[in-house]
Image: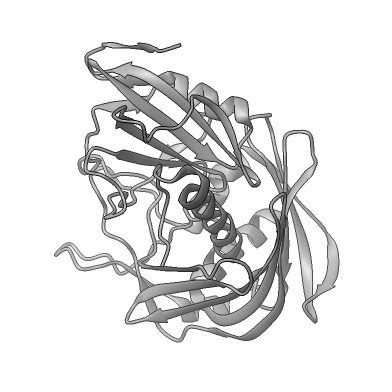
Amino acid sequence: MRRGHSTRGFGGVLCTALLIVSLMFALTFTSSAVAQSDGESSQGMLERFDCRTLAERESPETALAWLERSLWANHCYEFQARAVRIGADGVRALALSHDVVEGAEREVARFLDGPPVVFERRGRIGRLSWAEGDTSVPASPAGIAEHLDSLYRLRLNGEERLANRTTIRLDIEPLDDLRYGHHFWLDTATALPLKHILLNEQGRVVETFQITELRRPQLHQGEIDLDRPRAHPGDPWHPAWLPEGFIPQPVETRSSRHDDDIDHGVYSDGLATLSLFVEPVEGSDQLIPGMHRLGISHAAVRHRDLGGRIRQVVVMGELPPGVLLRVADSVEWQGGGEGNIP
């Protein structure tokens, strides 16, 4: 079972992790999608969203409304599917499933050819950012849609038949050259994304992900829990620069596959996501500084003097290489003591 990123075993584990992250991104539309319920309790009970309310909503008419509906659909529909992913590293077939068990989501992606890799994610609906004191944390697909609306140009581009279903195409074009563009084909009956094309900063297709068979999509007849507000863990480092709109994500990044001295942060604008790793440079098991190509993704590697020690900084994601390098070069350690190592 594969979960998350790792900087160990660059040629294998890291590449596989990025591949899995990209396919799960296509499955869930955005890992930062969150929700909000009116059921919040002053006694600390979990907030919940009732998926049955989606059946009562009017059909979307605008690109922004379709985006919001799709964010909800990705949480609330239970289904099984077959899909293909086409990228620079070849073609892979997958089996996908999504369901809700006792208020928690469960997603499974299984590669049907090549190395036998299975990815499983369980959890509640996440929140948009870390909590700070008593400040309310934005937590709704509407909030994410509005956030993306200030960073991308959204427009509808006609209907098309895919996987024997009618879809509407949603084009999402970045307003700057710091992130990639996207085309989504949304099932008009459920708003689930049936096809996704990722476009680089030159407008060239770098990945196509398409569901070829969607089996028994059913709206979950119940509620899904929201994650509790989480306080920032207070890492001693932080990126001094991020593309506009990127927010630190309140996700658990500790893993048994990471050494205790490997720190990991995740940042997202609600659509694009990058991972940042910081660890001491020790021994020979290190990455060569520079830019590395990993399928459709990139990894920027720097060896920096941070906190009085030489540390390896790795920034990964499906973003322009120059953006990843700039983020890696901007990492600062609280209290100074930093620099670049040639």
Residue 66 in the image: x percent, y percent?
Answer: 66, 62
Colour approach in the figure:
one colour
User: Residue 190 lies in what quarter of the image?
Assistant: bottom right
* Residue 8 visible at all: yes
Residue 38 in the image: x percent, y percent?
Answer: 35, 67
Residue 200 in the image: x percent, y percent?
Answer: 72, 39
Measuring 56% from the left and 70% from the top, which residue is drawn there?
73
84 over 308 or under it: above or below = below
Measuring 36% from the left and 40% from the top, which residue is drawn there?
265
Q: Quadrant of the N terminus?
A: bottom left
Query: With 225 as the anchor, is 45 left or right in this view?
Result: left
Measuring 52% from the left and 45% from the top, which residue is drawn there?
11
57 over 341 or under it: above or below = below
Residue 278 in the image: x percent, y percent?
Answer: 34, 32
Viewer-closest of 99 and 157: 99
User: Residue 203 lies in what quarter of the image?
Assistant: top right
Query: With 237 as the anchor, is 177 left or right in this view?
Result: right
Query: With 84 as the anchor, is 43 left or right in this view?
Result: left
Query: With 70 as the anchor, is 305 left or right in this view?
Result: left
Viewer-closest of 313 and 272: 313
Viewer-closest of 58 and 245: 245
User: Residue 304 lies in what quarter of the image?
Assistant: top left
* Residue 61 visible at all: no
280 over 150 or under it: above or below = above
Count of marks, rendered view: 0
Hey, which residue is sitting farthest front in the picture?
A: 284
